[in-house]
Amino acid sequence: MELVSTTDFLALREQLVAAEARAEKAEIAAAEAANVKAINADLLARNALLELQIEKLKRAQFAATSERSARLIDQMELAFEDLEANANEAEALAAAAAAKTTTVKAFTRGRPRRELPEHLPRERVVIAAPQACPCCGGDDLSKLGEDITETLEVIPRQWKVIQTVRERFSCRACEAITQPPAPFHVTARGFFGPSLLAMLLFEKFGVHQPANRQRDRYAREGVDLSLTTIIDQMSAAMRTLQPLYLLIEAHALAAERLHADDTTVPVMAKYKTDTGRIWTYVRDDRPFGGHAPPVALFYYSRDRRGEHPQAHLAGYTGIIQADAYAGYNALLKPDRVPAPLKRALCWAHARRYFFELADIA
């Protein structure tokens, strides 16, 4: 029997170790490839699910119930089921491949937290430094740097009473009494400040908070206001803003063209919710190179009778772009005073029927 030299034995052992290392790397690479394939299949399935959900929401929103739409959704559901099955199979293969290899630690990278707004003021709170080294007890400490952690905080709403003092003086020479004039109040004999009035109006019309709910919330904060007082103050504030509203209205009605539309709005009624209407008229010439400030007018009515747009646009002469609602027809009559309006139809409404035909075809 031929003997193997020590040199040959060491060379063979090195080749064996290298072959085992290559085999291990190949197994790890195969496991990683299978894992990537599984992740890709899972992402494809998730994407298909999202597309299916979006399509269903779009069909529900626009009330498209044609047979073509139903077939399209059925096909998407079948495609999603196939992709989901492929994802499960790829995941199983990846798990089987990973079982044959050395476990590789991994982690899921979390979404980075959004930075807090830069415009907010910063309040610096410094934690007291240690007086001695916790390791050796020495007191000769030198600052190396600092770590800052930011926490978002809010200051609760604060109520206060402003006392405006008007001192009276008498003249020692003629005994005349003088006193500075009373400060301006937004509402006559009102005791609500401008900021409070602005908050009431914003809560009412900006976030649709009824006056009675505002009253209850303020009472929980320790300020008991009657519902009648809140409503009276809001009404007085709106009357004060009436001149500004009239200027905005005049600017809108001076436009060469107006975009008009109406939409429903739920209204609280006795024992039920009623349906009202919000009429919107928009002046916006920016798409046509105009430089006039854009503006929108809003009017409210309890129904959709044609008398409402006729009253809103009683003094307007120009082009009105709207849908084919019959309530606008009286504005187009040749004998209308001061002049008949010109109608420009709406592309969004016109193309809607072509999309419906495309769904049916």
Image (cartoon, grey):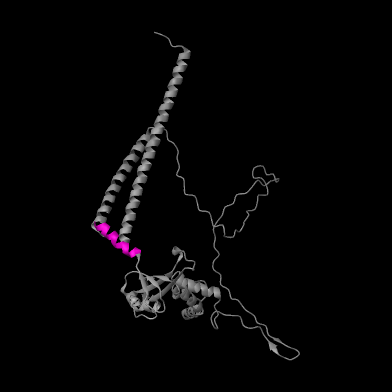
Q: Is residue 64 visible in this depiction of the protein?
A: no
Magenta region, mostly helix, strand or loop? Answer: helix
Q: Residue furthest right?
A: 173
Q: Residue furthest top?
A: 1
Q: Decide which of 166, 222 is in the foreground and name it.
A: 166
Q: Residue at x 68, y 86 (%)?
A: 178
Q: Residue at x 42, y 25 (%)?
A: 20
Horizontally, is 359 left or right of 302 in the view?
left
Q: Residue at x 34, y 55 (%)?
A: 54
Q: Residue at x 54, y 62 (%)?
A: 154
> Vertical placement of 11 versus 51: above or below?
above
The stretch of residues the image draws in magenta is: 347-361
Question: In which image quadrant can residue 285 be found?
Answer: bottom left
Question: In which image quadrant can residue 348 be found?
Answer: bottom left
> Vertical placement of 27 versus 308: above or below?
above
Please identify the quadrant where the N terminus is shown.
Answer: top left
Q: Decide which of 346, 162 is in the foreground and name it.
A: 346
In the image, residue 339 lies at what x, y percent? 38, 78
In the image, residue 153 lies at what x, y percent? 54, 60
| Magenta region includes residue 278 | no
For the image, the number of numbered tags is 0
Q: Decide which of 287, 276 is in the foreground and name it.
A: 287
Q: Is residue 319 visible in this depiction of the protein?
A: yes
Horizontally, is 124 left or right of 219 in the view?
right
In the image, residue 25 lies at what x, y percent? 42, 30
| Magenta region includes residue 348 | yes
Please identify the quadrant where the C terminus is shown.
Answer: bottom left
In the image, residue 347 lies at what x, y percent? 35, 64
